[in-house]
Image (tube, helix red, strand yellow):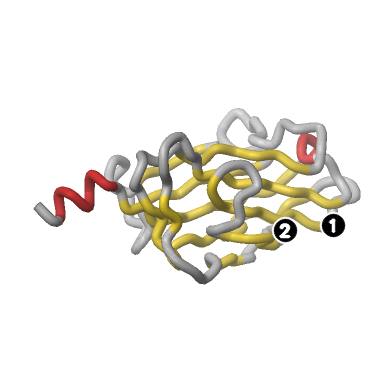
């Protein structure tokens, strides 16, 4: 998995602060992020500080490369607090290139203590480690306590 932070990496993601890239045969060496010999795999995107908030609806996902694998019929993602959390994106279908998944509606997701922001990738019809192609990008807007304090000092 690759993470880009708009400020630290001097990238422009519009209203988003972070972008995460997950894929099969991604990168120069062709390594896959999907290593589980099963249908589901969880990835920790980041570990926000207590009080940080993921601002909704500023979360989205899109598929850059169509997923492929023998028997594969669907690929979905959930984004939220901890493994299997769905507060940000719930059951977004990311199988084909061009698929765009907006965030769910609701209040900002506040983090406390040792919580993480995770994505769960679920395949139907093929184990994740057998995928031969596919790449998704997940964008979020994270308001950090540090940023809030600096802006309101």
Vertical side of 149 occupied by 115: above or below: above
Quadrant housing residue 28: top right
The answer to whether 123 appears left or right of 141 in the picture is right
> Residue 20 at x, y = what percent?
50, 46
Residue contact at pointers 1 and 2, CB within 8 angstroms: yes
The answer to whether 95 appears left or right of 86 in the picture is right
> Residue 149 at x, y = what percent?
18, 49
Local SS, label 2? loop
For image coordinates 32% across by 42% down, the residue present is 9
Quadrant housing residue 42: top right
Local SS, label 1? loop
For image coordinates 64% across by 30% down, the residue present is 31
Tell me the quadrant of the picture where the N terminus can be found.
Answer: top right
> Residue 78 at x, y = what percent?
63, 54
The answer to whether 153 appears left or right of 145 in the picture is left
> Which circle's residue, 1 or 2, is located before the other in the chain?
1
Which label was assigned to residue 47? none
C-alpha separation, residue under disc 1 versus residue under disc 2: 8 Å
For image coordinates 59% across by 43% down, the residue present is 22
Within 10 Å of disc 2 (Cα), the crowding (few <14, some 14-19, many 20+) is: many
Vertical side of 44 occupied by 138: above or below: below
Vertical side of 114 occupied by 55: above or below: below
Q: Nearer the viewer, residue 11 or 27?
A: 11
Residue topped by disc 1: 73
Residue topped by disc 2: 95
Q: How many marks?
A: 2
Within 10 Å of disc 1 (Cα), the crowding (few <14, some 14-19, many 20+) is: few
Q: Residue furthest left?
A: 153
């Amino acid at each position: 998995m690759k993470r880009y932070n708009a400020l630290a990496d001097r990238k422009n993601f519009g209203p988003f602060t972070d972008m995460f890239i997950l894929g099969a045969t991604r990168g120069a060496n062709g390594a896959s992020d999907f290593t589980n010999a099963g249908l589901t795999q969880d990835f920790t995107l980041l570990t926000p500080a207590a009080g940080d908030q993921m601002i909704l609806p500023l979360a989205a996902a899109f598929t850059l490369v169509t997923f492929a694998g023998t028997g594969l019929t669907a690929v979905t993602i959930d984004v939220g607090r901890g493994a299997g959390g769905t507060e940000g994106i719930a059951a977004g279908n990311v199988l084909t290139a061009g698929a765009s998944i907006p965030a769910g509606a609701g209040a900002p997701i506040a983090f406390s203590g040792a919580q993480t922001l995770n994505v769960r990738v679920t395949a139907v019809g093929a184990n994740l480690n057998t995928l031969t192609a596919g790449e998704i990008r997940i964008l979020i807007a994270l308001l950090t306590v540090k940023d809030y304090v600096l802006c309101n000092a």
